[in-house]
Amino acid sequence: MTNNDINIVNFANKAPNFAKLANQTQEKENVKGSFPVPSERFLSMTAHEMQVPITSLSWNMERLVKVLGEDAVKPDVAKILKRISEADTRLVTLVEDLLNVAKMQEGAFLVAKRPMQLVEVVRRALRTNEREALKRGVVVKWSADSAQIPLTIGDPERIYQVTVNILSNAVKYTPRGGTVTVTVRKTQEIAPATVAHGIPDNKIKADYVMCSVEDTGIGIAKDEQQNIFTQFFRGQKAVATDESGTGLGLFLVKRIIEQHDGAIWFSSREGYGSTFFYTLPVMDPYEDNK
Ligand SMILES: Nc1ncnc2c1ncn2[C@@H]1O[C@H](COP(=O)(O)OP(=O)(O)OP(=O)(O)O)[C@@H](O)[C@H]1O
Ligand SMILES: [Mg+2]
């Protein structure tokens, strides 16, 4: 394999800098005045159409390795295939995120709420992140007393999406040897007094189930903390780690939690770690009888 090949593969692994792209587009619009803005429908159709070839790429990659025979593939070729596969996984997530943002703008992002046991949803998210954490040498600890956790009202798929996003951030932004601790517990307030951002103004004292994800990672600089839930925002330290990302994850997470009448916030110290919290309202036991 030549150096050129390596550069091409590395290039494919880099996600575009969307914040920069957005700014550049804005600048062009300011200069030309009437730069056409793609409609939300156009955005969602494009993202939707992209899903098919991207999924096909990933499926055919797996087939290729099988046809060639795993043992027959030379280490150099295996390395390239692995890089292509990683880039493709990244593209799948990116297109999914863009599609979700477009759906939110169109008002077509559907949330199907029903009685839900948060512990089960969080467990499923933990299983999804297990391999990545192991690969990165990050220990994931988990605690919840299922018997003490009441049912909440929510869309299990959307809350799974929220939890996977927060967990994957914790794993991604925690160096090898670090720890991520996940807990689910019952709480009485929307947010404890010690938290930093994202607390709704009108704190209602009521029963909630709270999930927290604590990590011993890079943390978030104080002056960046107010931007964390903004579309396409990525912290300087996060970018410096060379981890790929678009800055859409927490933007989507916050909106989903708000659609559930829950709250999301975090506390963080640069160089020491972060803890993300979200709450969901406890199901009214008389709901069924109404
Ligand atoms: N657990 C964490 N530790 C440190 N920084 C974090 C953590 N979670 C989020 N951040 C910061 O918040 C930013 C926004 O997070 P978000 O998940 O929205 O985007 P991302 O991870 O960069 O990209 P992606 O769209 O792939 O999720 C990150 O770029 C990072 O700077
Ligand atoms: Mg993320």
Image (spheres, rainbow, N blue to C red):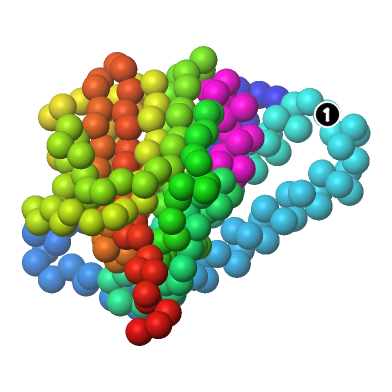
**Which region shows up in magenta?**
126-139
Q: Quadrant of residue 81?
A: top right
In the image, is residue 33 above or below residue 213?
below
Q: Residue at x 70, y 30 (%)?
A: 79
Label 1, on which residue? 74
Image position of 191 (left or right of 154) = left
Q: Quadrant of the C terminus?
A: bottom left
Amino acid marked by disc 1? Lys
Q: Quadrant of residue 15?
A: top left
Q: Where residue 180 sits: x, y (%)?
A: 46, 28
Magenta stretch: dominant SS? helix
Q: Is residue 133 visible?
A: yes
Is residue 80 or residue 260 the one in the foreground?
260
Disc 1, SS: loop
Q: Where residue 62 sits: x, y (%)?
A: 76, 49
The residue at the far bottom in this view is 290
